[in-house]
Image (cartoon, grey):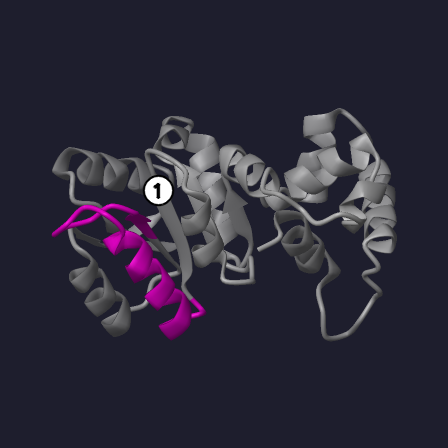
Amino acid sequence: MRVTICEDSTLFREGLARLLAESGFAVAACVDNADELLAHVGQDPPEVAVLDIRLPPTHTDEGLRAAVTLRERHPEVGVLVLSQYVRVSYAVELLGGRTEGVGYLLKDRVSDLAEFAAAIRRVGSGGSALDPVVVEQLVGRHRQPGDPLGRLTERERAVLRLMAEGRTNMAIAERLAIAERTVEKHCTSIFAKLDLEASAHDHRRVLAVLRYLNA
């Protein structure tokens, strides 16, 4: 899987490139600003672009702007943003009402290389990788009375929370120490309680996550 990295800290950028190469990824390019990132991806699209939210020249939201642009111009490219903190407004804008091929992780997660590599692969394969802290803050926003999420049991909420992080049924089963078949039953119940009927045009898993995140 080819990855393009955009990070203005030379030490972090080069360290990230080395770690990814050792984990079996092909690093297509390493750049330090949003303009170069957009140019590289436009000329030679990778499977995933990994970028910091804060980039030159102002170190505010240049990375977020670039990520949103990539999502619009190159929907086939997975986008994984890294940040030292979480801002709900950034997460909502990045998601843009869809969770395919997108990730938002705290930089601390990079220290767990196996987990980080798995997140990149999920994003590159069209899935999602949302930091548990991101999910918690998104879900913690004020909801309207009568929200159907109130129908879910505590265990169903736990399953949906892990689903929102981008976990597969097998990973959810391992995390909750339950059988994968039990996870499937919980998913079926979640879809029913959220009034998500099976359709050839909609992916109920994605719709359930969006409903949960209220994105």
Of residues 212 and 101, the one nearer the viewer is 212
Q: In the displayed structure, does residue 143 sit left or right of residue 84?
A: right
User: What is the quadrant of the C terminus in the image?
Assistant: bottom right
In the rendered image, residue 146, in percent from the top left (x then y), is placed at 80, 49
Disc 1 is placed on an element classified as strand
Of residues 76 and 156, the one nearer the viewer is 156
In the rendered image, residue 33, in percent from the top left (x then y), is placed at 16, 54
Outermost front residue: 145
Q: In the displayed structure, does residue 188 sit left or right of residue 208?
A: right
Residue at 34 percent of width and 67 percent of height? 69
Q: Is residue 58 magenta?
A: yes
Q: In the displayed structure, does residue 121 sit left or right of residue 158?
A: left
Residue at 18 percent of width and 39 percent of height? 14
Q: Quadrant of residue 201?
A: bottom right
In the rendered image, which residue does mark 1 sit on?
Answer: 82
As shown in the figure, which amino acid type bears the numbered disc 1? Leu
User: What is the quadrant of the N terminus in the image?
Assistant: bottom left
Residue at 20 percent of width and 40 percent of height? 13
Q: Quadrant of residue 149?
A: top right
In the rendered image, residue 194, in percent from the top left (x then y), is placed at 81, 54
Crowding near pointer 1: few (<14 within 10 Å), some, many (20+)? many
Residue 142 versus residue 73 in the image, above or below? above
Start and end of the magenta stretch?
Answer: 50-76
